[in-house]
Amino acid sequence: MAKTKDTRNKIVDLHQAGKTESAIGSQLGLKKSTVGAIIRKWKTYKTTDNLPRSGAPRKILPRGVKMITRTMSKNPRTTRGDLVNDLQRAGTKVTKPTISNTLRRQGLKSCSARRVPLLKPVHVQARLKFAREHLDDPEEDWENVIWSDETKIKLFGKNSTRRVWRTKNAELHPKNTIPTVKHGGGNNMLWGCCSAKGPGRLIRVKKRMNGAMYREILSENLLPSARALKMKRGWVFQHDNDPKHTARATKEWLR
């Protein structure tokens, strides 16, 4: 768009002199579309001045937008109420919907925080190393793996949901997740396995899980699951480094 009023007036003068939009654009170094827009505006409103915009002006100034965006970047769990209070202390009175609209214009949206395992730095590095080592493995290799694990399902209590303001595809950033641990009261312990071909057996563990019980579960359910899943010869059994899994007796049983 032509920025100065003199340029806009010159476009109108050349148009009244009979020059085409293309010729005016070539003479002034402007796009034909820009010239056409100025001429249409002059024909409609008989002026080239900037017209007042429709709607109410935005209450949050650019400085305030930067402040709340920076706050959300540092702590995505900041609530809209917190931001309302921050802006009010800075002299700007806004509502929560105004905060929501402003954050959405900045590419942020309110989402439920993902629950992920609580990992120490050594665990993160080990998982990253494993992923890099197997990045180029063919798909057929993964179809030949049975994955196994235990989990506790809570029966009572409230699984609270926290919301975060984040950008698209940032759901697994540590700031946007809720770390979880595998303990707590009022729950069922389950053992299960699966492969790329589907789920294997799912077993409820009625007593306290120990190495002997783990080996008993494997002896009763692992091979039947492999047969049901029609695993190929030489299939791989994969479990984590839980002490029950890495115990000498378990390793000897697996051999």
Image (cartoon, rainbow, N blue to C red):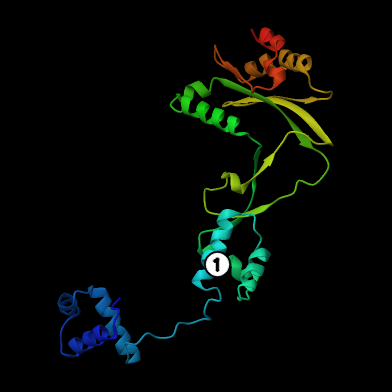
* Quarter placement of the N terminus: bottom left
Q: Nearer the viewer, residue 73 or 14?
A: 73
Q: Which residue: 67% across, 64% down? A: 82
Which residue is at the front of the view, 112 or 233? 112
Q: Position of residue 14 (x, y in %)?
A: 18, 86
Residue designated by label 1:
102
The picture places residue 221, in percent across and down from the top left corner, at 71, 17
Q: Is residue 132 left or right of residue 187?
A: left
Above/below status of 77 relative to 234 = below
> Around disc 1, counting alpha carbons within 10 Å, would you say few (fewer than 14), some (14 to 19), or many (20 or more)?
some
Residue 188 in which image quadrant: top right
Any part of residue 91 in sight: yes
> Can you give x and y, in whole percent of width and height, for residue 49 in the image?
34, 87
Residue lying at the far front in this picture: please name it.
Answer: 90
Q: Is residue 69 above or below residue 55?
A: above
Q: In screen coordinates, is 243 left or right of 68?
A: right
Q: Residue at x 83, y 36 (%)?
A: 185
Picture quarter with the C terminus: top right
Amino acid marked by disc 1: Thr
Residue 112 location (% of width, % of height): 65, 51
For this view, does 162 lie left or right of residue 209?
A: left
Location of residue 197 with respect to 156 vertically, above or below = above
Q: Tell me the element at label 1.
A: helix
